[in-house]
Amino acid sequence: MSIVSKFGGSSLSSEIQFKKVKKIIKENPERCIVVVSALGKRANEDNKVTDLLYLLHAHIKHGVAYDSLWETIKQRFLNVKQELNLAYNINQELSLLKDQLTSSVPTVDYLVSRGEYLTAKLMSEYLDFDFIDAKDVIIFQPNGKIDLDKSRKQLLQILPKDLKVVIPGFYGAYLDGKIKLLDRGGSDITGSIVASCLGASKYENWTDVSGVLMADPRIIKNPATIPNLTYEELTELAYMGASVLHEETIHPIRDLNIPVHIKNTNQPHADGTLICNQFEGNKNMITGISGKKDFISITIYKNHMSSEVGFLHRTLEIFNRYDINIEHLPTGIDHVGVIVSAQCVDTCLYDLIESLKVELNIDEVTVKKEIALITIVGREIIKNPGLSGVIFQALGEKHINVLLIAQSPRELNIVIGVQNSDYIPATQILYEKLVHEKTNH
């Protein structure tokens, strides 16, 4: 059985981190496919190599001197090579890249991808694994979407028999060989695709935290780690702000039920978080809490709305025409509320309202701004009657007004809306009431 192990930039920031990665890989012979990000930050005041490469491209594009910036990038790679006493002639690779910068401006995708490419080259020699270039195995369709079938065929064709390989994350290529980047955080997706193509026994995602936390540590002091969660729970938490994994990561592996294990490179023996399709039971009432600020509620009033066939359909068509994604849709007899991200309507709010008034012949439209949405996620929610009452009571005691409350049809999560200004205290109160008190009783 093979395990795909992806290491993020924080796991690869220096030669010290490279040594930790090697120890982890050598501890388990099933860890035979390694996916790497580019060198990350060594300290808070440091820079990720990816960010430096984006900046380098901007300097070149706008005719700004970049010699000092180039030397900084170059030295990051040379330090790792020298400290680990590697034979890889990275100087030659860097010289060729520098020549490309002066002869013609490379595409931003190509230049930024060199961060992962060079990091993978260093790691492959250090582990004594084969190197496979992501451009040869992560194949994009002309529309910019990944072609899983072609990627699987290429990967299986190229893989050596012993399966010991290092693959750079974050990029692939079109069939003509032109490099294309994934979204930021895309190395997670590379690892997921590789795990899917190989039918791996597990996909490990190594980072600088010991699993997925039950709440944002910037809001909750020392939140508990979620020992296990389902793909569905992860999707809900990630959509509303939890950011351990790129939200597109689970799609290639979910149908195959390949477990994802979030682990900490700096604390490799910590349990971390295991993610699968199903788990039996959960000692906590909820799995986690996450949220986002800056939503807008647009409420449409019209007498006898409920008896007007097609009214909701026409309403949604107007939002669709303005390319606005709808987050929630609470309704009443004579009104419908549409919750959207403030960013989505930033440039079109007044035009949108006018369209709603004219085309729907409505009596009134009201807009509430600065709304935060908090989602309480848990597969055990369905077994906890009265949870909404607990939420209302806890927030009411602290004089926090609940602007909306909604529960998903699958009863996996409850979403509440509060003012932006109440977002942090509301999250703290809910964590205390639903997690901390329950755990300590």
Image (cartoon, rainbow, N blue to C red):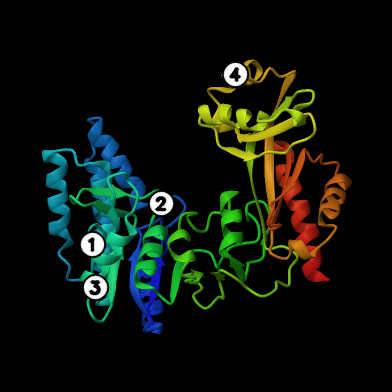
**In which quadrant of the rendered image does the N terminus lie?**
bottom left
Find residue 78 and report its horizontal and vertical position in percent. Answer: 23, 60
Indicate which disc, 2 or 4, sits on the residue closer to the N terminus: 2
Tag 1–tag 4 contact (CB < 8 Å): no
Residue type at mark 1?
Answer: Asp
At horizontal 75% and vertical 18% (from top left) the residue drawn is 363
- SS for tag 4? helix
Write down the quadrant of residue 232 in the picture.
bottom right
Identify residue for label 1.
133
Residue that mark 3 sits on: 159
Q: Which is closer to the viewer, label 1 or label 2?
A: 1
Classify mark 3: helix, strand or loop: loop
**Residue designated by label 4:** 355
Q: Is residue 293 left or right of residue 195?
A: right
Position of the C terminus by quadrant: bottom right
Kindly report the distance in space between the C-alpha atoms of the residues bearing marks 2 and 4.
49 Å
Q: Amino acid at mark 2?
A: Asp
* Residue under label 2: 46
C-alpha separation, residue under disc 4 versus residue under disc 3: 56 Å
Query: Image height check: is 416 above or below 360?
Result: below
- The first of marks 3 and 1 along the sequence is 1
